[in-house]
């Protein structure tokens, strides 16, 4: 189909995946599990079990570990571990789809501007040449460097060309707040290219706001500290559970 725009599709698909990662934190835990097809049952021996009620109402962004007893801490910890894996998957998908958009965009720009490049140019060389030739401002050059380091090299490359099957070399990059921050840098670079192609002035903040809030229901700006590290939170939940029993045994002795 001649009119199919691969950059349009992959760009929006990337933000769709970012939205899925965002929802892991903001919807009730039970809903987050359902949306990612995670089957999770909690069986305990409390006289009056309340874990099901808790996960129907509690979202990750509102968790206060001090308000959760040692038994529910154990159950929630296992659910957080499952959701952390889904967060990683959404971050990988975001990076791969966004990179596809960036590849399609720069290759299109090269074809319509006859940009002079070295033989067999790398992705970095293509974009850096385009940006410098078109006198991109410093904040765009800085944004491209951040995108290249954090998304292209940090997530996309180790996901597309993994050295082995298990483990993440830098798991902190595979978190919603970090990907949100770094994809914004990539989006500004993309917006600059649109401004050059169409000879127009871009309001970068407004452009990002439209993409996030008006199209994909993600906040334009987030407070990163509001999104807990799921691995650490899960670990602390397990620790609370084990500490209760360790203290109980210690008191007996």
Image (tube, grey):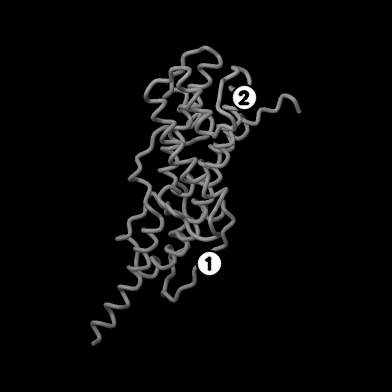
Q: Residue 97: which numbered mark, if any?
A: none
Name the side, left or right, on which 105 lies relative to 222: right
Residue 120 x %, y %:
59, 33
Q: Which residue is mark 1?
A: 41
Residue 224, by quadrant, is: top left
Q: Residue at x 51, y 26 (%)?
A: 190
- Does 33 sit above or below residue 157? below
Name the side, left or right, on which 139 lies relative to 31: left
Q: Residue at x 43, y 20 (%)?
A: 136
Neighbour class for label 2 at 10 Å: few (<14), some, many (≥20)? Answer: few
Residue 98 x %, y %:
55, 36
The residue lying toward the viewer, choosing from 158 and 226, is 158
Neighbour class for label 1 at 10 Å: few (<14), some, many (≥20)? Answer: few
The residue lying toward the viewer, choosing from 107 and 230, is 107
The residue lying toward the viewer, choosing from 63 and 242, is 242
Q: Residue at x 62, y 18 (%)?
A: 112
Between disc 1 and disc 2, whose residue precedes? Answer: 1
Q: Residue at x 56, y 59 (%)?
A: 38
Q: Residue 108: which numbered mark, if any?
A: 2
Residue 186 x %, y %:
47, 32
């Amino acid at each position: 189909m001649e009119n199919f725009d691969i950059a349009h599709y992959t760009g929006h698909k990337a933000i769709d995946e970012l939205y899925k990662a965002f929802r892991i934190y903001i919807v009730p835990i039970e809903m987050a599990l359902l949306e990612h097809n995670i089957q999770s049952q909690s069986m305990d021996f409390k006289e009056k079990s309340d874990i099901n009620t808790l996960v129907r109402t509690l979202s990750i962004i509102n968790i206060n570990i001090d308000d959760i007893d040692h038994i529910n801490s154990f159950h929630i910890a296992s659910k957080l571990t499952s959701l952390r894996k889904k967060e990683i998957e959404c971050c990988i998908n975001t990076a791969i789809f966004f990179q596809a958009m960036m590849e399609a965009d720069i290759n299109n720009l090269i074809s319509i501007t006859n940009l002079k490049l070295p033989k067999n140019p790398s992705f970095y060389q293509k974009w850096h040449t385009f940006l410098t030739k078109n006198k991109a401002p410093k904040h765009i050059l800085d944004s491209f460097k951040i995108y290249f380091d954090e998304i292209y090299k940090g997530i996309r490359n180790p996901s597309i060309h993994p050295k082995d099957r298990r483990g993440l070399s830098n798991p902190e990059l595979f978190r919603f707040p970090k990907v949100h921050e770094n994809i914004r840098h990539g989006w500004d670079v993309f917006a600059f290219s649109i401004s050059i192609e169409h000879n127009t002035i871009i309001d970068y903040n407004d452009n990002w706001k439209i993409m996030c809030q008006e199209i994909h229901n993600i906040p334009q700006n987030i407070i990163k500290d509001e999104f807990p590290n799921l691995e650490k939170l899960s670990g602390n939940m397990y620790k609370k559970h084990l500490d209760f029993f360790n203290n109980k045994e210690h008191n007996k002795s």
